Image (spheres, coloured by chain):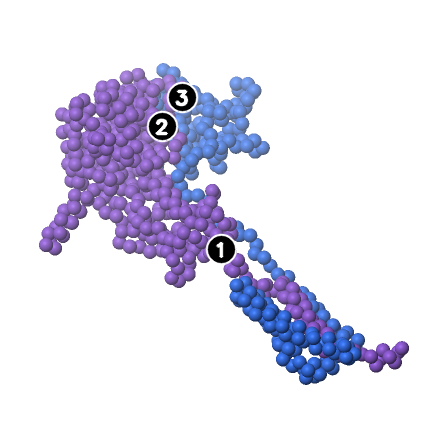
Amino acid sequence: MRWCLALLICCLAVVNALSSSGSRLLAILEDTEQKDLYSTLWADLEARGYDVSIESSKSEQLALFKHGERAYDHLLILPPKSKGLGPSLTPKHILDFMNKDGNILLALSGKTATSSAISSLLLELDIHLSTDRSQVVVDHFNYDTLSAAEKHDVLVLQRPGPLRSDVKAFFDGEGVLALPRVAPQTLGDSALLSPILRAPATAYSYNPKEGMPAAEDILATGSQLNIVSAMQARNSARFTVLGSVESLEDKWFSASVKTPSGKKTSTVNREFAKQLTAWAFKETGVLKVDKVEHRLATEGAELNPSIYRIKNETIYSIEVSEYVYDKWVPFDVPGDDALQLEFTMLSPFHRLTLQPTHRTDTSTVFSTQFVTPDQHGIFSFRVNYKRPFLTSIEEKHEVTNRHFAHDEYPRSWAITGGWVWIAGLWSVIGGFLAFVIVWLYSAPVTDTLKKTQ
Amino acid sequence: MHLWQATVPFCLLAAAALPGAAATAWGFTDATVAVQPKGAGVNGGFKEQLAASKPLSKPISLFGADTLRVTLTAQEDSSPKRPDQAFLLLKDAQTGLDISYPFNVKDNGKSRVELSQKDLPIQFLSLSGPVDAHIVIGGFGSSDAYDNSVFKLSIDRNPEEAVPTVETERYGKKPEIHHIFKDSASSPPIVITLAFVAMVGAAIPALAGLWLFLGANINHLPSAFKSAPLSHATFLGSLIAFEGIFFLYYTSWNLFQILPAMAVVGAIAFVSGSRALGEVQGRRLAGLR
């Protein structure tokens, strides 16, 4: 019986050994006969536990939603040649899918003009394509001399490092990528957008049908051209744009490339495709809060009380896990970054860095100790951790910060300045008692008075 | 990648040195860089020749409304030719910013680009040091492209004018905030307090001395206790008990504890006080007071 249960748990673990947000993946190809071009990609995804369904965008029974719920967890869209993706995949449907926490990986191709439906979908997310939608990135320095000796449109680039010094690198590693016929994107100014792979500084884009554009027609050059970019919505749903769909083909997974100045090497497209799909479909960069605790810094204090007093020494701790491919591991904050706690009433009174204090097998406990401000009111412990490439953490726990009670102030004898008044009070009391005794028992002093009279 | 680009000129040199190497390379000649202040004539201002192999030693200053002009003739293996890519590329190594300005290229390879501060993105205006200006010339096909730093461009501004900045919101850590507490209440120095306590304490001996000087005494105490011992003792005792209750109220008791005690002591004081004061009245009627 017990081994039966163990086997069941084991099976469940195997089935769940993939994305933190579900396994149903829908791949949209305009022409399903093209699916053999990407057979390694499908095999890799299935090996990681995805339940891949490949559908044509022209299919009649294709629907992203069933009974108002998502029918799939993830969507992989390969670029269509026709004007749109069909009636069941309008930009509105795709945005609804994201609003319901679905993840999308959209591949573009510079081979043909991008369809206007996709362009308007990207515009909704503040990702911009060129106005003619048929630009290709070329670089006369980092191209593959074997396959694109004349056209220079197969870029050979290193895998990207971290975006900033305080951002975790999810796509780095050794080796070069071959990116044939990239459709470049430029990004709007939004904190939700982040570039994954940018073109080198010497790259530019042009329309192969029209030749080199006039100087005033160039909108972006160099690193402003994005080859792979990502948008993570406020609900942490992910939208990833890959400029070169051909880089996912079997052919480029194991191709050999050579730059003008380099040696012949084989590409790491397969490894990069794994990193990219893993991030896009929430196998990496997913954070989870396991537990939040706050209490007074005294021994045996009550856990998570609803009321604190001003100037109380308080300890706050939060337990965070990160999902990496198939398991939860302790979360490490990247080097220059910090997980911060705010103690807020309208605006933060304290904003403190939470330090890792304890590690379990699957999580890290971050905590800090501080004194509640000398302002009474309704405060909240807030952890608002939103970073590029990581799902957001937003924890808010409301507590009352009360004033001193009447019997919690220091007593008057403890205040040295009050001693004068205390001494005055007791000397009046002593004087009163002495006066009563003298008045009750004093004999009149007649003798001396008589003598003087 | 930097290493790659650094190796490009070496590869070019190597290619030139080897007689058997067939690869052709892009380059330029007759290059000049000029800075023309606003309002000055075409030939006004600063002008210098550029060499393809070596960058200028001094940074070129682009101040205020000046216009920077770079002209050159692009070449493919020493013969003028129109390249597919001819860019003036500005790069800042510290921030990683880069932007390219394409040359206006004629068919004979003659190229020209003009640039003033208002063409630059706002991020370039607030840089601390000069940026690297590269010339990038390349084309399709097998010729090696050219990309070298030819001069440093220092983007200068009138220090009295505010540098335009751009507010961008990016997710990241925010500055720490530590609440500044109000100063706690403080007492005067203990010496001053003790001096005033001593002055207050001295009032009791001073009062006693004054009374004794005026002849205050307790000569009637034995006779009073002889005639009404119980009432005098309880009356004085109840007065002292009142003060004791006040002391307990001050230190630990609450109002509900002192009220019954006060009621009891007050009743005792009323009864015993009227008896004791009756005795005092007896002494007055007897002419003793």
Q: Mark 2, mark 1: which one is toward the viewer?
A: 1
Q: Which residue is mark 3?
A: B103
**Badge 2 and badge 3 in a common chain:** no
In this picture, is A206 found above or below A15? above
Left or right of residue A19, residue B64 in this image: right
What color does chain B have in the rendering? blue
Which residue is at 44% across, 43% downward? B174
Q: Amino acid at mark 2?
A: Asp
Pinpoint residue B32: horizontal percent, then vertical percent. Answer: 45, 24
- Looking at the rendering, which quadrant does residue B206 occupy? bottom right
User: Reading the chain from its start, which is encountered first: label 2 or label 1?
Assistant: 2
Q: Amino acid at mark 3?
A: Phe
Q: Amino acid at mark 1?
A: Lys
Q: Is residue A145 visible?
A: no
In this picture, is A265 found above or below B175? above
Q: Is label 3 in contact with label 1 (beta carbons under 8 Å)?
A: no
Pinpoint residue A101: horizontal percent, then vertical percent. Answer: 28, 35
Q: Quadrant of the C terminus of chain A?
A: bottom right
Pinpoint residue B120: horizontal percent, then vertical percent. Answer: 46, 27
**In terms of secondary structure, where does tag 2 sit?**
loop
Q: Which residue is mark 2?
A: A126
Disc 3 to disc 1, C-alpha distance: 66 Å
Disc 2 to disc 1, C-alpha distance: 46 Å
Pick the residue in front: A231 or A441.
A441
- Looking at the rendering, which quadrant does residue B246 occupy? bottom right
Q: Which chain is home to disc 2?
A: A
Name the mark on residue A90. Answer: none
Disc 2 to disc 3, C-alpha distance: 30 Å
Left or right of residue A161, residue B38 in this image: right
**Crowding near pointer 3: few (<14 within 10 Å), some, many (20+)?**
many
Which residue is at 29% across, 51% downward? A363
